[in-house]
């Protein structure tokens, strides 16, 4: 092991909220260790410098060479490696970071942490550190639910150890239940939230709408659209990671609630407007939801039967409330910055410009949802930021989370320095 400190990350920029932050990843021995490789890559994409320690069991599942290639650092595995303790290496590892991430945190590793055992490099570092610790449990469902593991987690919580996951799902042993390692994006979001407390949007309040709305026709049918909620959820996660107190008002979607946000689940446009209104006052509003423009005037109390009335049913439609326009109206409850979305299939920028003026919002993000773009339900997006000040700013195609991070940075620049305010 060298005696140089962990290198700093590159300077901050629009897509690197963790620039300058240092993470020590302790990788435990479990099949879920392969997910940690992706988490390391994403942490570095966000600007963090990552150094890794692996337990001996972890090397049975992923190789130190793979971890080293992704982290850009030599991986440490042995407490008694030549020169290691002559340089008091475990102390330097334990202190030369901003956060210690334990993933996967196996039942064995959690037990050793709770008992304060330190019989290898990983547990010695964990006992010697005075930095925040974030554990990501992963194990068989019965092991997670065992009273010993429950007690160990409670003990660690009293010592200030935070946790993300485990998730519920299929196990490697063909069982089902809680015990799956959190997904890489969830882990990275949790690290980001811990390390950016007091970030550029600290003290600000944000409300984000996401997903579609479902407007009922009868008890089993509805009017809806193809929105997945991926972009809105990503924006909410980015705002929370930047320090904003964030409320996510979401229509029906398969997307999990992002870490660090308060999610309110709704179905209809009217429910969404009521939830947004209840979340005010806010400094920031981002309307990313694909709200249905119309609803059925009178929802049927029973299922409409095929053939009733001699043909297809006639639906009388009425206009839904316009949430973006409502938020944009001048008044004491208007957020300082209102951002809308324009999902268009042609003349994207021109249509979005007209929409911004028509709705009265400050900014609008235009994106092309024409067939073949992969925008709806896809992992990536291409957007054009229209602020009314000069020409639109076209952002390169990126993941929806990267779009969210870039928007968070732009919002922080517009609103100015963080403010001090008690959370609601």
Image (spheres, helix red, strand yellow):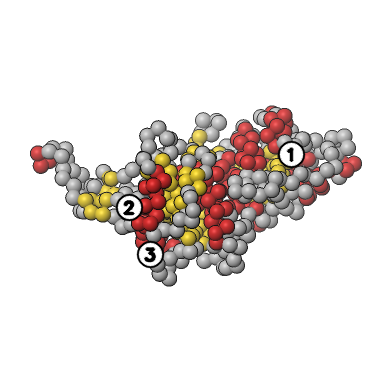
Q: Residue at x 70, y 32 (%)?
A: 69
Q: Residue at x 45, y 37 (%)?
A: 378
Which dot marks residue 245?
Answer: none
Label 1 belongs to which residue?
53
Q: Is residue 319 left or right of residue 174?
A: left
Label 3 belongs to which residue?
329
Tell me residue 171's x, y (percent). 53, 34
Q: Is residue 409 left or right of residue 78?
A: left
**Is 350 located above or below residue 70 in the figure?**
below
Q: Earlier in the sequence, mark 1 or mark 2?
A: 1
Q: Which is in the foreground here, disc 1 or disc 2?
A: 2
What is the C-alpha distance between the residues marked 3 and 1?
Answer: 54 Å
Q: Earlier in the sequence, mark 3 or mark 1?
A: 1
Which structural element holds mark 1?
Answer: strand
Tell me residue 280's x, y (percent). 44, 64
Task: From the viewer's side, name the closer residue of 342 and 332.
Answer: 342
What is the C-alpha distance between the residues marked 2 and 3?
Answer: 22 Å
Q: Are marks 3 and 1 in contact (CB under 8 Å)?
A: no
Location of residue 305 (image quadrant): top left
Q: Earlier in the sequence, mark 2 or mark 3?
A: 2
Which dot marks residue 268?
Answer: 2
What is the C-alpha distance between the residues marked 1 and 2?
Answer: 48 Å
Which structural element holds mark 2?
Answer: loop
Tell me residue 92's x, y (percent). 81, 47
Q: Residues within 10 Å of mark 1 (few under 14, many from 20)?
A: many
Task: From the viewer's side, name the closer residue of 254 and 28.
Answer: 254
Answer whether residue 249 is visible to the viewer in this image.
Answer: yes
Tell me residue 127's x, y (percent). 76, 49
Q: Residue at x 70, y 45 (%)?
A: 10
**Is 319 located above or below residue 345 in the figure?**
below
Location of residue 419 (image quadrant): bottom right
């Amino acid at each position: 092991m060298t005696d140089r400190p962990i290198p700093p990350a590159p300077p901050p920029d629009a897509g690197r909220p963790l620039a300058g932050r240092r993470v020590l990843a302790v990788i435990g021995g479990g099949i879920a260790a392969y997910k940690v490789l992706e988490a390391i890559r994403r942490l570095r994409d966000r600007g963090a410098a990552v150094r890794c320690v692996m337990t001996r069991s972890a090397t049975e599942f992923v190789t130190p060479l793979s971890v080293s290639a992704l982290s850009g650092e030599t991986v440490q595995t042995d407490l008694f490696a030549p020169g290691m303790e002559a340089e008091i290496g475990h102390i330097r590892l334990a202190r030369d970071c901003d956060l210690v991430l334990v993933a996967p945190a196996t039942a064995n590793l959690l037990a050793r942490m709770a008992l304060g055992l330190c019989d290898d490099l990983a547990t010695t570092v964990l006992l010697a550190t005075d930095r925040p610790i974030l554990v990501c449990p992963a194990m068989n469902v019965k092991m997670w639910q065992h009273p010993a593991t429950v007690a160990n987690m409670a003990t660690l919580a009293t010592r200030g150890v935070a946790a993300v996951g485990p998730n519920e799902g299929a196990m490697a042993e063909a069982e089902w239940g809680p015990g799956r390692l959190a997904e890489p994006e969830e882990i990275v979001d949790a690290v980001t939230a811990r390390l950016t407390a007091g970030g550029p949007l600290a003290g600000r309040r944000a409300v984000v709408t996401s997903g579609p709305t479902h407007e009922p026709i009868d008890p089993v049918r509805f009017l809806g659209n193809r929105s997945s909620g991926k972009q809105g959820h990503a924006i909410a996660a980015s705002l929370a990671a930047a320090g904003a107190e964030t409320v996510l008002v979401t229509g029906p979607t398969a997307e999990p609630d992002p870490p660090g946000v308060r999610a309110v689940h709704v179905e209809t446009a009217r429910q969404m407007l009521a939830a947004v209104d209840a979340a005010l006052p806010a400094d920031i509003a981002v309307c990313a939801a694909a709200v249905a423009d119309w609803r059925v005037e009178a929802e049927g109390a029973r299922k409409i039967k095929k053939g009733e009335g001699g043909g297809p049913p006639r639906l009388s439609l009425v206009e839904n409330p316009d949430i973006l326009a409502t938020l944009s109206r001048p008044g004491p409850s208007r957020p300082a910055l209102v951002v809308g979305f324009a999902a268009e299939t042609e003349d994207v920028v021109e249509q979005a410009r007209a929409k911004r003026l028509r709705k009265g919002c400050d900014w609008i993000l235009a994106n092309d949802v024409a067939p073949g773009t992969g925008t709806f339900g896809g992992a990536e997006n291409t957007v054009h930021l229209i602020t009314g000040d000069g020409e639109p700013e076209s952002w390169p195609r990126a993941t929806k989370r990267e779009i969210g991070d870039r928007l968070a940075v732009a919002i922080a620049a517009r609103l100015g320095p963080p403010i001090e305010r008690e959370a609601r």
